[in-house]
Amino acid sequence: MKQFSLLSRRAAALFLTPAGLLVAVFVLLPFFWVIVVSFTNRTLLGVTAVHPDFVGLQNYIRLFNPSTFFTRGQFGSSLIITTQFVLLSALIGQALLGLLLAWLMQAIPPALKRAVEAAVIGAWILPEVVIGFAWFAFLDYDNGTLNMILTALGLPRGDFLLQQPFWVIVIFNTWRGAAFSMMLFNSAFSSIPPSYFQAADVAGASSFQKFRDIALPLIRGHVVTDLILITMWTFNVFTPFLLTHGGPAYRTELLSIYNYRVAFKDFEFGQGSAVGVIIMLINLVLALIYLSIGRRRSKAEREAAAS
Amino acid sequence: MASVEFRSVTKSFGSFTAVDHVDLSIGDGEFVCLLGPSGCGKTTSLRMIAGLETPSSGQILIGGDDVTGLHPKDRQISMVFQDYALYPHMNIADNIAYPLKVRGESQEKRHARAQEVAGVLKIGDLLSRLPSQISGGQQQRTSLARALVYPSRVYLFDEPLSNLDAKLRLEARGFLNHLQRDMGMTAIYVTHDQAEAMALATRIAVMDRGRIVQYAPPIEIYRRPATTFVANFVGNPPMNLVPVTARAEGDSVRLSADGVTLAPLPLSAGLKAALAAGPTLTLGVRPEHLSVTEEADNSIGGKLFANENMGPESLVTMERPDASRVTARIFTDDHVEVGETVRFGFAPEHVTLFDGAGTRIPRDGEAGL
Ligand SMILES: Nc1ncnc2c1ncn2[C@@H]1O[C@H](COP(=O)(O)OP(=O)(O)O)[C@@H](O)[C@H]1O
Ligand SMILES: [Mg+2]
């Protein structure tokens, strides 16, 4: 089969060269550089800053050292916190909340629906720093909005960032990302022909039955896509740093924050690079799962269309 | 089964009135077709019976109960959708049995019942397939089976055959006819195809721009179209309409138009009333009541414009001096050539007259058909 093409090969190559160069200099080069550095004891200061030694797998072995693995502020502990964070804030929080909101949106009048969509997108496109500061102001012990509301209601104030830092970042990330899942599920629901639901209405189905038997099975592909995307994003998210700085006592130190601390606060470039490489590997696995599911899906769709 | 009644039902979308003060009474066990051109409000009317659309004003009654504000699931009705609305992820058996699943029937019972209904509809051997794996006609039967699988008071059909090819449509039409008689179901059937309505309905409600212009059995719609709109919509091809000028002469009326010769008609009460409003009337004759003739009396003259051979019959169309066209359905043996001057003759009793507003003028002593 002859492929349709908009440009000749030579023109395409010409257009791609600048972008290709940029990618090479700023993405590929650092990528390999990090891998190389992860096998050295490079630091910012001292002798090893200029003449780092090749240390083999030592950085990696240190990360997986069983005696310190689960210690607070160490790699293993951070990995566990990150996993819990992903499970609670992305898979349960964002996806479930997004799904629920998207389903509720199907029942409201179109004009209101568009208004809600606009508001949600507005919240979603706010810069991270603005969001972080807004939440900080919201949760502050002395002058925070939440404590003011609690006081006005006669309830005790709480120092949430100190007492429940993990749940704060879970709720924060749920709030932050639910909009994306909602928009994705919303458009998935909208692509289902209305007559499917009307036929179910006439047949006597309840709202829950329509959701379970018709809507959910028909958007299964979108759910998988959503879960993998938000898992990857949440796994790499750094914004909670703006709220808790990874603390107190490393209780909210996600892998990205841990990596940042090792590399740019302790200035252990070799060690930090090793953490970075492992994060890259985890991301690679997630991306491969995502791509293979996407490929299987489009293959199934092609077959369905062909039959 | 149950009766259905519209009481002055209006439905507006913004400033647009899709259904305009409709009164309609459908008896228990009747097969009523809502017939009309696209956009006249048929689907909207049907969806209001189903509860998928809420009337802006007026009431809808099913079996004598006011259901105007009731949710579709509480109305005990079935509906077959134009696009079939089969669930692509469920096999045919699950599609058919879905209304039973919703009612909490056991898996065993559901499948037994689906099997039974599918057998009647001759899709019993497709039960394990997906909708994408069966033909359009089979999908149509599946959607019908899903509507029949549970007891309903009223069956609603929205152009269920419009996506089928001509042969399948004819087959499905005959099948629906039988089914409705056997079950004695109350059926309301939306279509823009007048032949389908004629073949299926016990009564036809002809709609035009949100109003019902005539509600009568098919034969009456055919023989006594209430308005020029109905006359022009029903019949294949529809009734020929020729504007004529009327002049009363004592006890009779003389109608004249270019190329038309017509023996004087007795001045009936209806004609008298129509003439009081003005001398311009419309003369209607069905193509099947016209034949090629040599005689001048009761005939329309013109130049032959087209001749379509349809097997035993031909549709021949003439162009009158004012460029309007008149079509006759004649035996193919009556040979005429395009370009020839011809006359189409008719019997006076086959003439239908409409007044200046397009309403049919009744004959004296008109009663049965
Ligand atoms: N949800 C809607 N919003 C606005 N206009 C509508 C809606 N549904 C139907 N209409 C309009 O009402 C008129 C009648 O529609 P419908 O009942 O579907 O006609 P039909 O006789 O072809 O089935 C059409 O002009 C259509 O555009
Ligand atoms: Mg319609």
Image (tube, coloured by chain):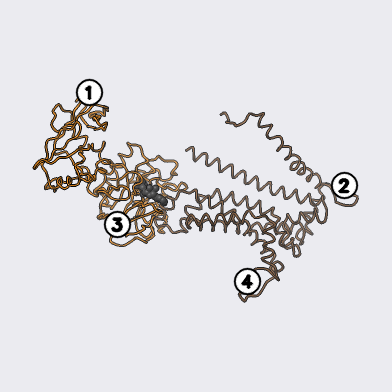
Chain colours: A brown, B orange
- Using the rendered image of the protein, determine whether residue B115 is visible from the camera's viewpoint: no
Marks 4/1: CA–CA distance: 94 Å
Above/below status of A80 relative to A32: below
Give the number of the disc on residue A52.
Answer: 2
Residue B191 in picture, x, y percent from top left = 32, 45
Circle 4 chain:
A
User: In the image shown, does A102 or B275 lie closer to the viewer?
Assistant: B275
- Secondary structure at badge 3 equals strand
Q: Residue furthest right?
A: A47
Mark 3 and mark 4, same subunit? no
Give the number of the disc on residue B6.
Answer: 3
| Residue receiving disc 4 | A149
| Residue A57 in the figure: left or right of residue A18 | right
User: In the image shown, does A49 or B150 lie closer to the viewer?
Assistant: A49
Mark 3 and mark 2, same subunit? no
Marks 2/1: CA–CA distance: 107 Å
| Residue receiving disc 1 | B340
- Secondary structure at badge 1 equals loop
Q: Quadrant of residue B105?
A: bottom left
Crowd rating for badge 3 (residues with CA inside 10 Å; few <14, some 14–19, many 20+): many
Marks 3/4: CA–CA distance: 54 Å
Give the number of the disc on residue B189.
Answer: none
Mark 4 and mark 2, same subunit? yes
